[in-house]
Image (cartoon, rainbow, N blue to C red):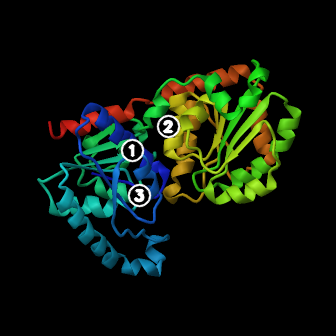
């Protein structure tokens, strides 16, 4: 049983692990549990896995001073009662939690009331664990972490396994750059040359307003000044309509609310501009892409800021804080990287050396060792 939700950063690592478990043992039964209102209710069934929902309630921030948190114990009990029914019906041997508030009820119920009936595994994507995973680590049999620096935050360090972040199977397969570019810009096939560059902008699955505004204010100038420059721009679902109404159609610009073919997008790109979610960072490393990271200042526990500066250190990423971000600073950073072949090569090499493309396969093997 997998419990994951809230954001793609929690969901897709779980899916990647599930895929590798299926590769090892095609007969394995897998069930995902999450919130019916969350992204997981759509994302998980689209990957072919069974999904059931339980009532889930996040803690409001700040935790100690939010009146709504007074009701949290009652809400948690309600979630755990439903979790017990789901656990009893599916009767899993192993439960895997990949973070987010949706993982707490299932994992806590299993840990407190099903000891001996199942094993518990958690996987932490960020450099610093979230509250749910930190709490669940006291009950876990294995704790998989993405970064060596993460181990110090867990009380039982002996349970920690440094594996890297699981990434989707499609991103681990070779993809021709020429084929990927043709997918996005079929009419430009005859004009590609050694100087052609594609900038991939990832505005988040829901939308990163600061990134979208900065790109909006500089994309036209960049495309007019560089005839061999192309942009693939994922605005995020919530921002797409606004951006589409403001952006002029251009043959060297692809605008999309959500990227369904990330393997093609990474393969086509020469430079990635993105938030600093842990999974995106791992995908950038695994695909060996130079990157400009703009960490979100709104993510709990400051995860993205920490992720971004780790990426700066190990993968050579350029970090721009949201306070520093505007069309000028972003434009200068793009030109500095794309205008320096040696820097691009160094960033590619550092990213690839830091990546762990086989993380999900390693995690899957460890998970199965708990019952074999």
Depth order, front residue of 322/221:
221
Mark sitting earlier along the chain (2/1): 1
Identify the residue under disc 2: 282
**What whole-number distance in Å separates the C-alpha atoms at marks 3 and 1?**
15 Å
Is the residue under label 1 in contact with that under label 3 (CB below 8 Å)? no
Depth order, front residue of 87/135:
87
Q: Residue furthest left?
A: 116
Identify the residue under disc 3: 100
Quadrant showing the C terminus: top left
Disc number at residue 15?
Answer: 1
Q: Of the residues tagged 2 and 1, which is closer to the observer?
A: 1
Image height of 337 relative to 48, above or below: above
Is the residue under label 2 in contact with that under label 3 (CB below 8 Å)? no
Rendered location of residue 229, percent (x, y): 78, 31
Depth order, front residue of 98/69:
98
Q: Residue furthest front?
A: 187
Helix, strand, or loop for circle 1? helix
Is the residue under label 1 in contact with that under label 2 (CB below 8 Å)? no
Helix, strand, or loop for circle 2? helix
Rendered location of residue 303, percent (x, y): 51, 51
Q: Is there any visible trace of residue 323 in the rendered image?
A: no
**Crowding at mark 1 (Cα within 10 Å: few <14, some 14-19, many 20+):** many
Mark sitting earlier along the chain (3/1): 1
Residue drawn at x 53%, y 42% as measured from the top left: 280
- Compared across the picture, whether 196 is left or right of 357 comes to right
**Based on the displayed image, in which of its 4 quarters is residue 103 positioned?**
bottom left
Q: Of the residues tagged 3 and 1, which is closer to the observer?
A: 1
**Based on the displayed image, in which of its 4 quarters is residue 178 positioned?**
top right
């Amino acid at each position: 049983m997998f419990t994951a939700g809230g954001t793609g950063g929690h969901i897709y690592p779980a899916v990647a692990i599930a895929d590798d478990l299926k590769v090892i043992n095609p007969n394995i039964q897998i069930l995902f549990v999450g919130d019916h209102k969350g992204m997981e209710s759509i994302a998980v069934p689209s990957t072919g896995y069974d999904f059931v929902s339980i009532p889930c309630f996040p803690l409001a921030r700040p935790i100690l001073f939010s009146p709504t948190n007074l009701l949290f114990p009652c809400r948690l009990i309600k979630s755990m009662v439903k979790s017990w029914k789901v656990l009893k019906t599916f009767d899993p041997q192993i439960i895997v939690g990949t973070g987010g508030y949706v993982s707490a009820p299932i994992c806590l119920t299993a840990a407190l009331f099903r000891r001996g009936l199942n094993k518990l595994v958690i996987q932490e994507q960020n450099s610093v664990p979230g509250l749910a995973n930190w709490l669940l680590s006291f009950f876990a049999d294995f704790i998989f972490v993405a970064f060596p620096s993460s181990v110090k935050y867990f009380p039982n360090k002996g349970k920690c396994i440094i594996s890297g972040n699981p990434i989707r199977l499609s991103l681990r397969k070779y993809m021709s750059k020429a084929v990927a570019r043709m997918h996005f810009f079929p009419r430009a096939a005859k004009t590609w040359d050694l100087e052609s560059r594609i900038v991939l902008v990832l505005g988040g699955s829901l939308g990163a307003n600061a990134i979208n505004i900065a790109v909006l204010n500089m994309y036209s100038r960049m495309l007019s000044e560089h005839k061999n420059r192309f942009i693939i721009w994922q605005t995020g679902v919530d921002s797409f309509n606004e951006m589409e109404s403001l952006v002029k159609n251009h043959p060297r610009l692809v605008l999309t609310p959500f990227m369904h073919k990330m393997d093609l997008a990474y393969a086509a790109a020469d430079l990635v501009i993105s938030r600093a979610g842990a999974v995106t960072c791992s995908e950038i490393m695994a695909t060996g892409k130079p990157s400009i990271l703009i960490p979100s200042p709104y993510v709990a526990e400051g995860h993205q800021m920490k992720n971004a500066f780790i990426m700066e250190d190990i993968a050579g990423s350029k970090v721009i804080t949201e306070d520093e971000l505007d069309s000028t600073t972003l434009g200068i950073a793009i030109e500095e990287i794309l205008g320096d072949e040696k820097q691009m090569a160094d960033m590619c090499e550092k990213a690839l050396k830091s990546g762990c493309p086989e993380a999900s396969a390693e995690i899957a093997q460890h998970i199965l060792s708990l019952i074999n």
